[in-house]
Every structure is written in C-alpha cells, then in structure tokens.
Image: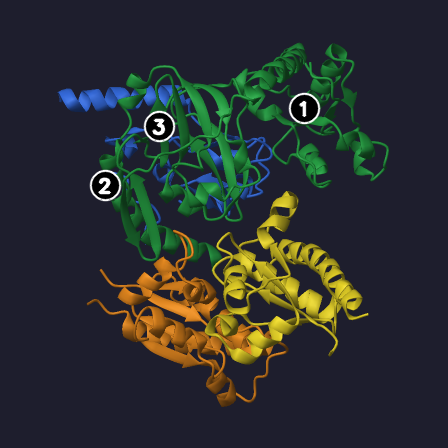
C-alpha cells in the first residue's frame, strides 16, 4: 500500500439504515487498515480546524449513505476532490442486500458492510496498478455524417463506432473498447460540468449504466452498448468536462472496457449509417416534442 | 497620467445561465466591491469596433469574464484591443461549488446563481487590486 | 394534446415499445413526494395528482426511455425501482428473433 | 415544415435598453412562442466560427431562417452583425422607441428592471411575438 495517508469520511446519516451502514463500513475499514485516518463528519462540518492540514495531504475516501452525498460535499466545499466516492445505495443493489427496516443493522447489513470494506481495500490496491495504464488516446482523422436541425449541428462517425438507441457509442479495438456519448446526447445535456466515473474493475452488462455526467440542466448516465469490465476512465474529463461537448467521439471518450463478447453485443447495436438515420428522425421529431414539454414545464 | 481604471467585459451571453453569472459578477464588482475603480464595458460594441471604447481599453486595464469554452470576450478583446490583463471563466466557479449548481433560469436569475456570482466577484475584486497596485509602482 | 408519443407507433430496437415492460415503480412507503423525479424527466412519465397518499403516479409509462434510470439517481429516499436490465435485454432479443421468423 | 424564427437581442450592458431587450427575448422564447422561435446569442454570432461549435451555426441559421433583431439603442449592433455575416434582417424592434411610447413605466435600473421594467419587457415581447406570427408562415 502506497505510503501517503488515507482518510475515511463516512456520512452521519443516523435517520436511515443506509447511513448507519455507511458508518459501519468506515468502522470495518479502520479495523482492517488501522493506518487509515477516520474523520468525524460532525467535527469537520463544525468548521473545526483539526483535520484541515491532514486532509490537504491525503487521499480521501468518502462514504455516502444516499445520493444527497453529504460527505462528498464536505470535501468539495474545501476545494478538494474525493479520491474515491463510495455510494451505499448502489452497493446494496449490487450485492442485493436490502437495507434493514430498523436502525440497528441486522446481520445481513453488517455482512454487507464487511464486504464493502474489503471491496474498498482490494480496489485501492488494484487501482494503483491500473492507474498508470490510462495512456492518452491518439485519434486519427475520420469521416462523419452531419446534419443541422435549427441551429444545432450533429455528427456521426461513418465507420468504427457502434451505437445503441440511448445515444451512446462503443468503439471496439481488439479485446478492449472505448465508450462515450454521441453528439446528439452531448447537445441534449448542454455544457457538461461534472463527471462521475464507475469503479475500475467493475463488471458491466450490456445496457448497464456506467457512470454519469452532469450539466446545469440535467444528470444523464452513459448506458453501455457493450458488456465487459471497466479497465480505465478518462481522467482528463475531470478538469475538462467540456471535451465531451466539443469532441464527443475522440478526446471526450468516457471509459474503457475489456470486452466479454462483442459479437453477441453487436446484434443489438447499430452501425454508423443506421444510427445516423435513427438520430436524424429522432432529432427532428423529438426536438419539436421536447420544446413543447420544456415550455410547458417552465410556464 | 489620469488615474488608471479596470474595465470588466462580461461575455453578454444570453443562451445559458453562465453568461448571466458573468454579468451579475460584473455588476457586484463595479457597483459595490470596487466602486469607482472598476467600470463595466459592453462586448458587442467592442466587436463592432467602436474606436473610442477600444482606445479607452488600451490605456487602462482589462478583465474579461467568459461564460463558456468559446471565450467570445477573451477572443474578441484580444483581436480588437490586443491585450487582456486577466481572464475568468464562470464555469470554473460553478465546477468548484458543486453544491451551488446554478438554476437554468436567466431572467430573473436563481439563488444559487447569485451565490456563485458573489463568490466570483470577490475573486475578480482581488485581481482589480493587484492590477491597480502594480500600476502605482509603475507610476512612482 | 396527448403528452405521450402514440405508444403503438413507437418502437425500441425494432420492437414495439408497448411490448417492453420498462418504467419506474414508486415505493410509496419510502417516497416523500419531493417530486425531483418529475422535475427531472423531460418525457413526462410522471404525473402529479390530487390524491393525498398518491401525490405522484407513473402516468405515461411508454414515454420512459428503455434502459434509462436517471430519475432513480435523483431520488434521495431511493424509492424508485426498475426491471432487471438483463431480463429486458433477453426479452428484446426474443421479440426480435420472433419478428424475423414470423 | 414551417421555419423557426431567429431572435437576436442586443446584449448591451451599459444601458437599460440592453437589459430590456434581453428580458423580452427570453420571454418570447420561453413563454410566448417557444415552438416557433430560437434565441441566437449576439456575441457568439458576431464572434464567428472560432471553433467547430462557434458562431458558424448561428450565422448559417440566420441565413436560412427569418431573423428578428431587438435593439437596445441606436448602435443597432445585432442588425449590423446579421447583415454583415448572414443577410437581410426580417424585422428590427427598437426597444428605445417602445420605452419612449410608455412614459408611465420606468424601469428601476439596468441591473434590476423591477416590476415596471418587467411590464415593459412584456410589452416589448408581445410586439416581437406579433412580428413572429407574421413571419412564421409555411414557405
């Protein structure tokens, strides 16, 4: 384990069993890795200075009980970035262990906390090996179909990419493949400001949602056209989320996966020309439709 | 030499809320934080090539505030005036304060949009001081 | 003006949309009617009602984009569930092969 | 297929006419005629095709679609920009003239129109909407 210090910051959600699980995971983590520093969210939130110096020079693992993400916010308010963000609701779904009805955890939930703690430690170890594997991708010139609807300009690469009807693409390169969003989807999202990546090593099935990207208008998920395992994420998107808007098929790639069985996935996907047809009608028909809905919602 | 001023040129975008953050930030700096030292200038006039405004900017300090990666204010002031003393992006302040995600409303702007504009205004106001301080050294 | 596409005309991956059981299910024990999901969804799947203990219902379920669960991500009390994606994928595959033979 | 109408508001920052023209443009595009209008961003339009997604689309749009400019003062920046980069303007609304025609309403300030200012913006928006209906006719 790399030498620099690691901090663990659970949320303090006492009113929900999900929050109590978050706390339990933190305690289990410290049991397994005593060298980790446990940060008390209440003291941190009170503006007390004890942790400031330590936080500046450590990797911070935040553990959120629900999507309000109080621990993440506590860290981001200090202009810091969590090294790892653990979301208990997603993990309880992943291991399909229902949060207990009452606030004192049943053994199922305690077992879940142990599994998550082990997961985090295993993930930390292999995250370090995979971290340096994210080579910058050099993208060659390629040809595009394009169309303008009102003042919006949409492109679709002619070859090498495959698409699902959720407007995401997959670019197979031998045993691995890149995933990203189409020009159409980046336009629907408008200026993307935040990206949330899945964990490296996570197994994904075709059409699973794989991370999300957020603009002032909406939060959208990348719905994977292929199945496999996450082996890399595009770290450049954190300081430059606008790459997804400006260059969605190249510099704006989102994650890389190791492919399970692309031949099978391929059956349910469209190639460039097919997707261009699909997107053309959708852009024209849906734009009219969405304009109406949006205007009704604002009135 | 007449007392130096700092001219602030927001990008005047009206398609997205990021333009409004730039405008609101400029109002706060010019009307409150740096009253008398900072003045607002109008980008469309600069793009149109209004001589007297471009001369004015050349003789004083210029700060541009852009609302999206296309940087219309930065690019056009560089083209017409030839220099920019400091540049800000409203999307930076948005990214640093994820819990104050701006509402997409433009007229009137939402609460979070105001909070972000205040935060950015404080940062711009510090830059106004810096720019005016080293002009004093130059004059002595 | 009907808020939904006309469901029978719509298809998803070559299969009639109304043959794919994909839409959110609200767990009314957990739901606190914060309406974040309705504010989020641009396709008007949800509808607000006068009924006190069912202030929000899934009205136009075929408007819901298959495989999209973004509204569930905006739900703090985690009260929205969707069908299992693997089963839905399998169903679509079968319907597509039936269509080819038929 | 009816062609949408482009709305370009002068984004003047130094006078109330600019704020009024922006407010009126938003009211038209969001509330009065959401299905038949598209807002074009004047600085982006004038700044031109800096990058792939730059002003090029705004300019091409104004070439093929009737475009209305809303001017905050006599400088008429939007009209000049459209005529230089796209072509003739379908109509121009002079905010300062409408303001003169309503002396009973005076806006609070350029930073905050206040209630009377917003009423004025609505009157201007209605004027624009009328123009839009005249132009929004199938070819």
Number of the label disc, if any, that sits on residue A171: 3
**Chain (blue):** C
Number of the label disc, if any, that sits on residue A17: 1
Tag 1, which secondary structure?
helix
Q: Please tell me if label 1 and label 3 are on a single chain.
A: yes
Label 3: chain letter: A
Q: Position of residue B71 (x, y in %)?
A: 51, 57
Q: Please tell me if label 2 and label 3 are on a single chain.
A: yes
**Chain (green):** A
Q: Residue C78 occupies which quadrant of the picture?
A: top right
Number of the label disc, if any, that sits on residue A277: 2
Q: Is residue A250 left or right of residue C32?
A: left
Q: Earlier in the sequence, mark 2 or mark 1?
A: 1
- Chain D drawing hue: orange
Q: CA distance from mark 1 to mark 3?
A: 41 Å
Q: Earlier in the sequence, mark 2 or mark 3?
A: 3
* Residue found 53% across the figure and 18% down from its top: A94
- Chain B drawing hue: yellow
Please, is residue B46 above or below residue A255 in the view? below
Label 1: chain letter: A
Tag 2, which secondary structure?
helix
* Residue found 51% across the figure and 85% down from its top: D99
């Amino acid at each position: 384990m790399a030498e620099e210090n690691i901090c663990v910051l659970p949320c303090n959600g006492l009113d929900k069993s999900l929050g109590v699980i978050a706390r339990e995971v933190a305690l289990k983590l410290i049991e397994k890795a005593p060298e980790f520093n446990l940060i008390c969210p209440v003291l941190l939130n009170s503006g007390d200075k004890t942790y400031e110096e330590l936080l500046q020079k450590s990797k911070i693992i935040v553990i959120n009980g629900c999507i309000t993400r109080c621990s993440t916010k506590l860290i981001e308010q200090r202009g810091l970035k969590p090294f790892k963000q653990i979301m208990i609701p997603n993990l309880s779904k992943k291991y399909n262990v229902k949060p207990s009805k009452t606030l004192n955890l049943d053994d199922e939930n305690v077992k879940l906390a142990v599994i998550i703690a082990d997961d985090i430690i295993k993930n930390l170890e292999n995250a370090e090996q995979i971290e340096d594997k994210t080579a910058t991708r050099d993208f060659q010139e390629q040809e595009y179909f394009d169309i303008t609807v009102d003042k919006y300009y949409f492109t679709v690469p002619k070859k090498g990419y495959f698409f699902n009807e959720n407007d995401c693409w997959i670019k197979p390169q031998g045993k691995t493949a890149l995933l990203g969003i189409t020009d159409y989807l980046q336009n629907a999202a408008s200026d993307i400001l935040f990206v949330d990546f899945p964990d490296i090593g996570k197994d994904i099935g075709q059409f699973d949602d794989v991370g999300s990207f957020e603009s002032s208008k909406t939060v959208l998920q990348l719905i994977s056209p292929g199945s496999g395992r996450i082996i890399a994420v595009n770290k450049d998107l954190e300081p430059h989320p606008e790459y997804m808007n400006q260059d969605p098929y190249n510099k704006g790639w989102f994650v890389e996966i190791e492919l399970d069985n692309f031949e099978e996935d391929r059956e349910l996907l469209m190639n460039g020309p097919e997707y261009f047809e699909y997107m053309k009608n959708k852009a024209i028909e849906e734009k009219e439709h969405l304009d109406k809905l949006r205007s009704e919602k604002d009135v | 030499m007449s007392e130096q001023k700092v001219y602030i040129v927001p990008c005047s975008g009206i398609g997205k809320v990021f333009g409004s953050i730039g405008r609101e930030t400029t109002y706060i700096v010019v009307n409150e934080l740096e009253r008398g030292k900072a003045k607002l200038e109008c980008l469309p006039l600069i793009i149109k090539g209004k001589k007297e405004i471009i001369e004015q900017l050349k003789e004083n300090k210029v700060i541009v505030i852009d609302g999206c990666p296309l940087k219309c204010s930065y690019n056009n002031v560089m083209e017409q005036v030839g220099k920019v003393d400091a540049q800000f992006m409203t999307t930076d302040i948005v990214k640093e304060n994820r819990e104050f995600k701006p509402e997409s409303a433009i007229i009137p702007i939402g609460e979070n949009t105001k909070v972000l504009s205040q935060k950015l205004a404080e940062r711009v106001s510090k830059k106004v001081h810096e720019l005016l301080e080293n002009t004093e050294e130059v004059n002595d | 003006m009907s808020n939904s596409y006309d469901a029978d005309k719509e298809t998803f991956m070559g299969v009639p949309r109304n043959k794919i059981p994909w839409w959110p299910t609200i767990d009314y024990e957990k739901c606190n009617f914060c309406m974040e999901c309705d504010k989020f969804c641009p396709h008007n799947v949800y509808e607000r009602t006068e009924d006190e203990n069912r202030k929000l219902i899934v009205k136009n379920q075929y408007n819901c984009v298959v495989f999209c669960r973004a509204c569930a991500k905006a739900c703090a009390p985690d009260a929205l569930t969707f069908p299992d994606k693997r089963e839905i994928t399998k169903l679509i595959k079968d319907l597509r092969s039936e269509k080819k033979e038929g | 297929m009816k062609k949408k109408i482009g709305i370009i508001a002068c984004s003047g920052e130094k006078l109330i006419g600019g704020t009024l023209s922006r407010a009126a443009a938003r009211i038209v595009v969001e509330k009065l005629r959401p299905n038949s209008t598209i807002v074009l961003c004047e600085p982006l339009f004038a700044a031109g095709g800096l990058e792939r997604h730059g002003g090029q689309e705004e300019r091409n749009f104004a070439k093929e679609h009737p475009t209305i400019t809303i001017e905050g003062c006599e400088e008429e920046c939007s009209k000049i920009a459209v005529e230089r980069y796209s072509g003739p303007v379908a109509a121009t609304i002079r905010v300062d003239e409408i303001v003169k025609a309503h002396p009973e309403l005076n806006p609070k300030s350029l930073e905050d129109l206040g209630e009377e200012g917003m009423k004025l913006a609505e009157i201007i928006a209605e004027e624009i909407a009328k123009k839009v209906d005249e132009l929004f006719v199938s070819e």
